[in-house]
Amino acid sequence: MTRVDFRKMTVDQIAFHLAENQIGPVEIELLQNDSRTGVRKCVERFLARRQADSREQKRLHALFAYESEARCSGYTYIAGIDEVGRGPLAGPVVAAAVILPEDAYIKGINDSKLLSAQKREQLYSIIIEKAVAWSVGVGEVVEIDTVNILNANKMAMMRAVDSLAVQPDFVLVDALKLDGLHCPQRAIISGDRLSASIAAASIVAKVTRDRWMREMDKVFGGYGFAQNKGYATAEHLAALQKLGACPMHRKSFLHLTERKMGSTGQLGEEQAAAYLCGLGYEVIARNWRCERGEIDIIARDGGTLVFVEVKTRRSDRFGPPTEAVDTRKQERLRLLALSYIHTTGHSAAAYRFDVASVDLRLGTIEIFKDAF
């Protein structure tokens, strides 16, 4: 193989060569020792890109751990299932099911909540092109109001699975367990960050629902559906007060707007309470107070009493909401929880502390179970 003489190449030609070819350590050393500053910067950028690509490949390989485990157990068609739209005041809940080819390392694939709208759109196109099969299912507003958000969510997921052109022999589901599946399944908490198939489904579901809400904004103007996607932003709540509800609003959720929600914290607590109900929690107290302070939400998750601290942001200026729950705050919440149990006489053989992270800027909610 003829060695390239970099001395006879311009900086632009070297930059193009690095972008289009694989080069070895000898060539890298030559470029690092080149007298031209532009060439040395080119190789620095090349090495940085190569390191970033290596990290991304390792991350993607780890994302296929659950899929690889299922294939080692003899399964071939592994579908990831996720949904979006449990928390909004308006619009349907949308689920997606995606079967990816083995080791379909799609660069950048991740939980849809961690991606920009532009990146989701780009990945959506790649996913539906590369997928063995994909489909979406919808839980309509009337179904949410009739059977509750949790059951409508499961219905949407089942519809997505049933609509797949290739039926799966194993299913990975984000958080929930589905009844009536014809094949084995595995529920994974925060699965959209741990499984490539579930992450792909989260992107397909999110892009599908966001597009649909933009269309609904043209039909039912004034609520800002194109921007808020049905979530309870301050602008959306103001429009509700002015215009009243439209057919896209969930009547079973609208009682959450009856309380005054002038502050960021109040708005976040309302969204968190609705989201917890959608997850199957039973909310038994809101803003419970004693002389020691206040607990935002108290709920039951099966037989476990759950004390929920809600942290809300309208921007990322101050970092993730969960960072605000420091050691001092945790100790105060423990004392408050003991006061609640003692004062109310609630049976609490098992209890825990969750943190609800609400990002009003992105319209996302995340529950950190057993946070401390």
Image: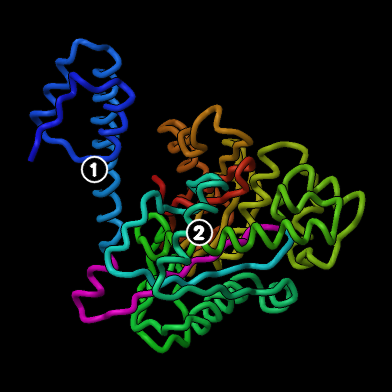
Q: Amino acid at mark 2?
A: Tyr
- Identify which residue is drawn at 27% across, 27% down: 14
**Is 178 situated above or below 245?**
below
Closer to us: 347 or 40: 40
C-alpha span from label 2 to label 1 = 23 Å
Specify whether 63 is left or right of 2. Answer: right
Q: Quadrant of residue 37?
A: top left
Q: How is the rendered protein coloured?
A: rainbow
Horizontal side of residue 371 vs 87, given as left or right: left
The 10 Å Cα crowd at callout 1, few under 14, some 14 to 19, many 20 or more, is few
Mark 2 and mark 1 residues within 8 Å of each other at the beta carbon: no
Residue 41 as seen in the image, left or right of residue 244: left
Q: Is residue 76 visible in this depiction of the protein?
A: yes
Check the image and report above or below for 56 versus 48: below
Q: Which residues are magenta?
A: 66-88
Mark 2 or mark 1: whose residue is earlier in sequence: 1
SS at mark 2 in the image: helix
Is residue 337 visible in the rendered image? The answer is: no
Helix, strand or loop under label 1: helix
Q: Quadrant of the C terminus?
A: top left
Q: Residue at x 85, y 54 (%)?
A: 221
